[in-house]
Image (spheres, rainbow, N blue to C red):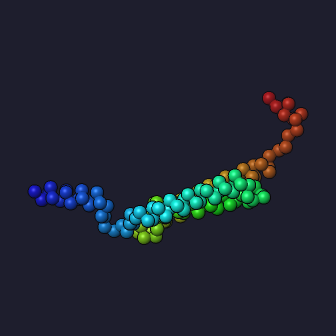
Amino acid sequence: MTTNSTSHEDAHEAHHGHSHGHEAGHGSLKSYVTGFVLSVILTAIPFWLVMGDVLDSKVATVAAIMIIGAIQIVVHMVYFLHMNTKSEGGWTVMALIFTIIIVAIALIGSLWVMHHLNTNMMVMSPEMMKNLP
C-alpha cells in the first residue's frame, strides 16, 4: 500500500503546485485585480489619444502608443505571468532577455538590409521598364 500513498501524495503535490525549488507564487485576487485595472487604463489611454486627436503630431501619437504598449507588456508579464527574478531561479527572466535580444537583432537586421537594398537599387525610368521582358 505504500505505492498508493506515495502516488496519492505526488498527485496532491501536483494538484496544489507545491513543487520544491520553484519560488514563483500564484497571484492573489488583489494582484489580478491590480493587473486588470492597469491593463484597462493602459488600453484606454491610446484609444483616447487617437479618438480625441490629443497630440498634434502623428509621430508623437504613434510613439506614445508604442511606449504604452511596452508598459502593458511588462504589466502582463508581472501580474498575470508572474515573471520575476525569483521564479524558476531567474531563468524565466533570462529567457525573456534572450528572446528580446534575438527579436531585436532580427528586426534591426531586416530594417538595415531593406534600407541598403532601397538605397542601392538602380532607378529605372518608365521607358526602361517598357523594354523589360
- What residue is rendered at 85% in x and 30% in y? 130
Left or right: where does residue 107 sit relative to residue 17? right
Point 70% across, 59% down: residue: 63
**Quarter in which the C terminus is drawn:** top right
Residue 81 location (% of width, % of height): 46, 60
Farthest residue in the bottom direction?
86
Q: Is residue 4 left or right of residue 93?
A: left
Is residue 12 something one can see in this rendering?
yes
Q: Nearer the viewer, residue 3 or 17?
A: 17
> Residue sitting at 50 percent across and 62 percent down?
35
Coordinates of residue 114 in the picture (x, y in percent)? 72, 50
Q: Farthest residue toward the front?
A: 52
Relative to 44, is 28 above or below? below
Q: Nearer the viewer, residue 109 or 62?
A: 62
Q: Which residue is at a point 73% across and 58% down the rendered structure image?
A: 54
Q: Quadrant of residue 22?
A: bottom left
Q: Does residue 16 appear to the left or right of 121 in the view shown?
A: left
Q: In the rendering, at what x and y percent does residue 3 appear?
A: 14, 57
| Residue 73 figure quarter | bottom right
Q: Would you say 6 lies left or right of 101 here?
A: left
In the picture, the quarter occupied by the N terminus is bottom left
Where is residue 28 drawn, in percent x and y?
A: 40, 64
